[in-house]
Image (tube, grey):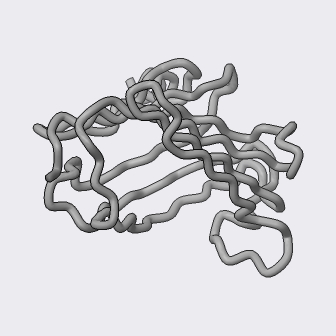
Amino acid sequence: MFGFFFFILFTPGVSEFLCMSSDLEMSYTFCDATAYAFAFNLTPCSIMNTSVWKTSLTWIPRSDITFLKVVFQVWYEGAKALHWKEILCSGADDEYSVCGTLKGETFATDFRIKGARIKFPKGNYDVLLEGFSDDSENNMIICLNFTMIVKQDPF
């Protein structure tokens, strides 16, 4: 039984359901044909009156993380709302704990996301998160497509 669950969790194209509440639904899929050992959790599953979300992340990278560039894109109701790029790991004076993780090594962390600054209007959001091991964005090491459905306005 555990083997079947492990297969489903890490099979590309299979949607991983994160949470569902009266005001929010979240899930993610891998957006390329490569399977990842990856898990993400978010609590509480709500955007109403939530100032901080607690998250946990577990990932087993397929290559050493000496350089990591993330590209984060958000679409709201089909229109691009945000495009952000950041180099998280460069190999020198890195401040993020994922930096230096070795291929096959389990990276696990808990962190908080402050949400009081963000008011998400009701609607459908698609969030694309890509990670690259080079600055030219040729060597993708992870790709996730999050779907977020906000069921009511937080105003």
Residue 128 image offset from top left, x and y in percent:
56, 36
- Residue located at (32% from left, 62% from top): 115
Closest to the observer, 49 or 95:
49
Which residue is at the far bottom?
A: 93
Residue 53 image offset from top left, x and y in percent:
30, 61
Residue 137 sits in quarter: top right
Residue 136 sits in quarter: top right
Judged left or right of residue 39, residue 50 is left
- Residue located at (49% from left, 41% from top): 81
Residue 49 image offset from top left, x and y in percent:
14, 60
Q: As displayed, is residue 65 above or below residue 129?
A: below
Residue 139 image offset from top left, x and y in percent:
84, 39
Q: As displayed, is residue 59 above or below residue 101?
A: above
Closest to the observer, 7 or 58:
58
- Residue located at (85% from left, 76% from top): 92
- Residue located at (70% from left, 59% from top): 86
- Marks counted in the figure total 0
Residue 10 sits in quarter: top right
Closest to the observer, 51 or 4:
51
Quadrant of image for the N terminus: top left
Judged left or right of residue 114, residue 91 is right
Q: As displayed, is residue 81 above or below residue 29?
A: below
